[in-house]
Amino acid sequence: MNAETIRIIDAIARDRNIDRELLINDLEQAMISAARKHFNSLDAEEFRCRIDPLSGDMHLWRADEEGQFNEIPIASLGRIPAQTAKQVMIQRFREDERASILDEFSKRVGEVLTGTAHRYEGGALVVQIERTEGFMPRSEQIQGEQFHPGDRVRCLIKEVREDGSRVKIVLSRSHPDFIRRLFEAEVPEVSEHIIEIKAMAREAGFRTKIAVSSIDSKVDAVGACVGVRGSRIRNIVDELGGEKIDIVRWNESSQILIANALKPAEVEEVSLCFELGRATIIVREDQLSLAIGRRGQNVRLAARLTGWDIDILTPVEFAKSLETLESTLRPIEGVEDAMLDRMGALGMISVFDVEEVGVEVLQGEVGMAEELSARVAVVCAERSREVAEQQQREKEEEEKRRTEEMAAADAVLAGGEQDVSAEAAADAILGGGPVATPASEAPVLDEEESSAASDEAVEEVVEASTTEADKNQEDASSTA
């Protein structure tokens, strides 16, 4: 051992982030293992080794029968003990490096870093991050996104755990916190906690909704996140491959928050039922598809963002539901207008809601007597089954009507093709001659078009007559 060895140890400690003293201790234990191998000893306390951390000088001792330690020349150990020392040293270095990686990256869970795409293994992307590798399962990737070896990959450290003799670092680009970290990087007000991201709902690769608020009245939370001409949000969207991001203004009022979350649709009214955790939204007919979104995406993300189950109705459907509820409850003796008003205030707008809330709510919140509440619950349960059956019949009839319309349209198209085929067959039988067009189907010409057509016809007749006369004259001359 010499100063060159110490420099190598220093380089390993620096490059792999391993404690220098730990490496020196590993070398000492490797030399003790080599001595035990050489002398075929099982006693771990029989040998001692010390390496000077400055000069690199190594000393090895062995205890005699009296317990006195005598120094052993290292050169006398031979080749096989040296190989043993090498193997032990490599194994201990790898264990130290694994422990260092585990300790370092465990503290960085939730952090966004940039790596290099390496390869795909069974659908999982292996990414080179700093001095180790991480893997991104298919479930943590953005749908439709594909990387090639050498591409830059920006990702979130989701989880770090030991997997046998390896440290497994799980990376993610689909986790909602990935977008949160991107906003912290692009919007200084978010990283400085002037603007707070209150809630977030994401369907990776398609759309994300974020609710933000500002603790400073002079700072517009939505405007700061969007940036001048959308510069800040554009950088985030580009990083996510074009994923849509809706930034909505947070409000402590659930009604206002739900209306904001359903934008760009315009909400007419919001009715909340706290007992069921359900919000009934009334929108105009022309806003219905916009509120629901493509394949229900807009309303689904709004529900996850606000924590409410959201039902969207048109004014006609809402009025019909209330009418059904009122017509069901009014004939019951003991039901008063004040009770109906309280039920409406509590968000019970249909017989289904009354059936779900149960008797206790009707007694405690609406103020019904025990017998009356039980009667109301039974009647609403019966009525809800009837309404459900009626809705099912209407749905089946609508599907049947659509099927018949599609079948009729297919028949019309097939009939048109048959007509064309019949005309083609007739042409083939008649020698392929032109088919006369009925007078009713002949094109109608205006006065100028008719005149032009007549002139062209006259010119063709004159030209044909002249040609025929010239031909007859030529024949006569040749005969003479």
Image (cartoon, rainbow, N blue to C red):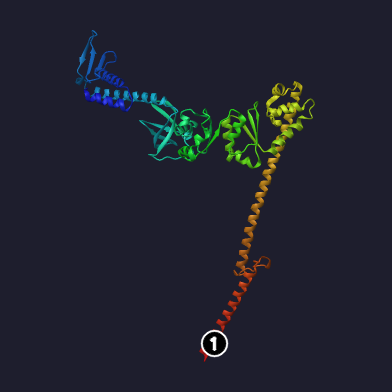
Where residue 448 appears, as percent x and y from the top left, is 63, 70
Can the viewer see residue 291? yes
Camera-nearest residue between 392 and 330:
330
Q: Is residue 229 left or right of residue 368?
A: left
Q: What residue is drawn where x is 64% and y is 30%?
A: 278
Circle 1 Cα neighbour tier, 10 Å, few/some/many (<14 / 14–19 / ≥20):
few
- Amino acid type assigned to the residue bearing label 1 in the image: Gln
Where residue 257 appears, as percent x and y from the top left, is 59, 31
Q: Quadrant of residue 74?
A: top left
Q: Is residue 61 left or right of residue 324?
A: left
Helix, strand or loop status at disc 1: helix
Q: Is residue 54 left or right of residue 400?
A: left
Where residue 301 appears, as percent x and y from the top left, is 56, 34
365, above or below 48, in the image: below
455, above or below 307, in the image: below
Camera-nearest residue between 445 and 190:
190
Camera-nearest residue between 2 and 36:
2
Q: What residue is drawn where x is 42% and y is 40%?
A: 147
Q: Please identify the quadrant where the N terminus is shown.
A: top left
Q: Which residue is mark 1?
A: 473
Q: Quadrant of residue 51?
A: top left
Can the viewer see residue 203? no
21, above or below 156, in the image: above
